Image (tube, rainbow, N blue to C red):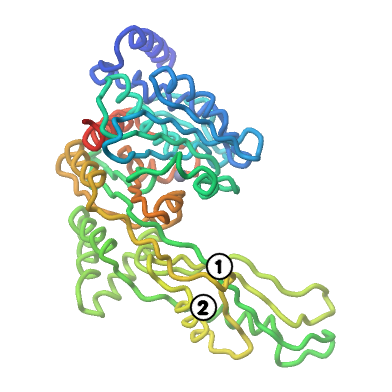
């Protein structure tokens, strides 16, 4: 009953909105906002990757952007149905463009574990539900509506505003690296927004902090190879490659890399110290101190959280094992692949040498899968830009009392295509979320709150006005 009544209210509200300028949306029922309506429509286009089919999103967006005067470019990839969507709103050209990037693909679902249809875009109890609500169709809807609002309100612009809905961020070959290699002039900009940091609210609904990612960790595959005598399994020798590899893996499993605080992560943990309660706040303070014993104890407590553990250090994770081919042959070699996730600026060769030292076995060799891999030369994006300053300021306006901090993203994103070419990228999931929301990301019953979408759209719109209005 309740949902039927609500649906009636929604339909009436939508009719009212369509007949009035969208500028009035802020004062109207938040559940009827254009961002919510767009997000529901985006969720209904199933872009689970593989295969992605991001062209569905391009088809949905193209008429809306064209109608408001954007130059629209749908970049087809060699894979049918897979496309990048690029829309450009022209400024007077006195400044270089600002770009907003959002991936249009989503990860798949375990449908039987959802309590509602993951591809229906259901709005219920103040939330939009569906695959991609948080990652990242919610952000795509926020970025798109903020950009469309600039055109609707005819804001005079000093620079072009470029909006990109990307393919293949969750997997596949035709991602932004491909787009940048083949169509760079279309996406070149002075700076850009993308997914990354978080707007975290506590149990009371108040936003505690806003983190804006300025760098990503890098992913480096390492091969560990043990060698022994290849022979008949009826006459085993002491130099078994598989035993040697197993001993090496056991040593790595007991090994922990050192804590390495960068200026960037130091500021993030300072923020956590301010926004958390004891005993956690004490651990964060001790972590930032100089007493090695206290730092170690703080690390042990904080690293119970796998995300914070990963922000504190280079991590290593065994991901593949390969040995043997017949049940009566002792193989001459056994191999493991370790996935290193490195802090910015770390030389993978240094880590390889460290792993070789930990394994301490001449029978076992550690090497980079790609021998040419070196330290990432991409520095964190500067906070000394108009875009970072504007976003930081508008985050404080939107969420009074919240801390705002730069952030190291624990994984990789599609921001590398720009950062590696010297274009600063600032990452944010542009809506307040709590711990419950976060566990649903890439999980079940993914959702984002209607009020959070409204706040995010307002914050991004105001940020764009600050950097691009004449
Ligand atoms: Zn994402």
Label 1 sits on a secondary structure element that is strand
Residue corresponding to mark 2: 252
Q: Is residue 342 visible?
A: yes
Q: Is residue 112 visible?
A: no
**Drawn side of residue 440 relative to residue 240, left or right:** left
Front one among 366 and 319 = 366
Query: Residue 343, image x and y in percent?
Result: 39, 66
**Disc ID at residue 81:** none
Query: Residue 347, image x and y in percent?
Result: 43, 73
Q: Residue at x 72, y 74 (%)?
A: 323
As drawn, which residue projects farthest toward the left? Answer: 401
Tag nearer the camera, 1 or 2: 1
Looking at the image, residue 316 lies above or below residue 13: below
Give the CA separation, mark 1 to mark 2.
15 Å
Query: Residue 217, image x and y in percent?
Result: 41, 61
Label 2 sits on a secondary structure element that is helix
Q: Residue at x 57, y 80 (%)?
A: 366
Q: Are marks 1 and 2 in contact (CB under 8 Å)?
A: no
**Drawn side of residue 392 relative to residue 103, left or right:** left
Q: Quadrant of the N terminus?
A: top left
Of the numbered discs 1 and 2, the one sitting upstream in the chain is 1
Label 2 environment density (alpha carbons within 10 Å; few <14, some 14–19, many ≥20)? some
* Number of numbered discs overlaid on the protein picture: 2
Label 1 C-beta lies within 8 Å of the nearest ligand 1 atom: no
**Disc ID at residue 221:** 1
Looking at the image, residue 203 lies above or below residue 241: above
Query: Residue 417, image x and y in percent?
Result: 46, 51
Label 1 environment density (alpha carbons within 10 Å; few <14, some 14–19, many ≥20)? some
């Amino acid at each position: 009953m309740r949902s039927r009544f609500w649906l009636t209210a929604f339909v009436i509200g939508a009719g009212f909105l369509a007949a009035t300028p969208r500028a009035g949306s802020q004062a109207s029922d938040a559940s009827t906002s254009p961002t919510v309506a767009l997000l529901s429509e985006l969720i209904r286009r199933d872009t689970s990757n593989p295969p992605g089919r991001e062209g569905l999103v391009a088809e949905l967006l193209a008429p809306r952007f064209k109608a408001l005067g954007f130059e629209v470019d749908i970049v087809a990839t060699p894979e049918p149905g897979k496309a990048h969507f690029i829309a450009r709103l022209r400024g007077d050209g006195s400044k270089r463009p600002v770009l907003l990037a959002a991936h249009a693909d989503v990860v798949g679902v375990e449908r039987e574990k959802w309590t509602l249809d993951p591809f229906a875009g259901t709005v219920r109890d103040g939330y939009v539900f569906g695959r991609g609500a948080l990652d990242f169709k919610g952000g795509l809807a926020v970025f798109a509506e903020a950009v469309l609002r600039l055109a609707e309100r005819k804001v005079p612009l000093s620079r072009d505003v470029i909006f990109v809905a990307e393919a293949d961020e969750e997997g596949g070959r035709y991602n932004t690296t491909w787009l940048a290699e083949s169509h760079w002039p279309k996406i070149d900009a002075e700076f850009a927004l993308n997914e990354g940091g978080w707007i975290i609210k506590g149990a009371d609904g108040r936003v505690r902090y806003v983190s804006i990612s300025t760098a990503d960790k890098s992913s480096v595959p390492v091969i560990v190879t043990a060698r022994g005598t290849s022979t008949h399994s009826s006459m085993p020798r002491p130099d078994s490659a598989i035993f040697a590899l197993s001993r090496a893996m056991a040593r790595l499993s007991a090994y922990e890399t050192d804590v390495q605080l960068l200026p960037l992560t130091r500021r993030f943990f300072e923020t956590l110290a301010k926004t958390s309660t004891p005993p956690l706040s004490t651990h964060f303070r001790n972590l930032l101190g100089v007493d090695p014993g206290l730092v170690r104890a703080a690390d042990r407590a904080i690293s119970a959280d796998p995300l914070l553990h990963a922000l504190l250090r280079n991590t290593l994770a065994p991901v593949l094992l390969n040995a043997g081919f017949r049940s009566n042959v002792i193989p001459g070699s056994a191999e493991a692949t370790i996935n290193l996730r490195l802090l910015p600026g770390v030389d993978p060769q240094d880590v390889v040498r460290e792993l070789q030292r930990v394994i301490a076995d001449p029978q076992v060799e550690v090497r980079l899968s790609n021998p040419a891999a070196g330290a990432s030369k991409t520095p964190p994006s500067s906070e000394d830009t108009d875009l970072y300053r504007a976003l930081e300021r508008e985050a404080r306006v939107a969420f009074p009392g919240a801390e705002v901090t730069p952030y190291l993203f624990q994984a990789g994103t599609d921001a590398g295509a720009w950062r590696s070419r010297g274009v600063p990228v600032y990452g944010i999931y542009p809506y307040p979320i709590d711990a419950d929301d976060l566990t649903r990301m890439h999980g079940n019953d993914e959702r984002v709150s209607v009020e959070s979408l409204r706040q995010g759209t307002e914050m991004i719109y105001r940020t764009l006005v600050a950097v691009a209005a004449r």
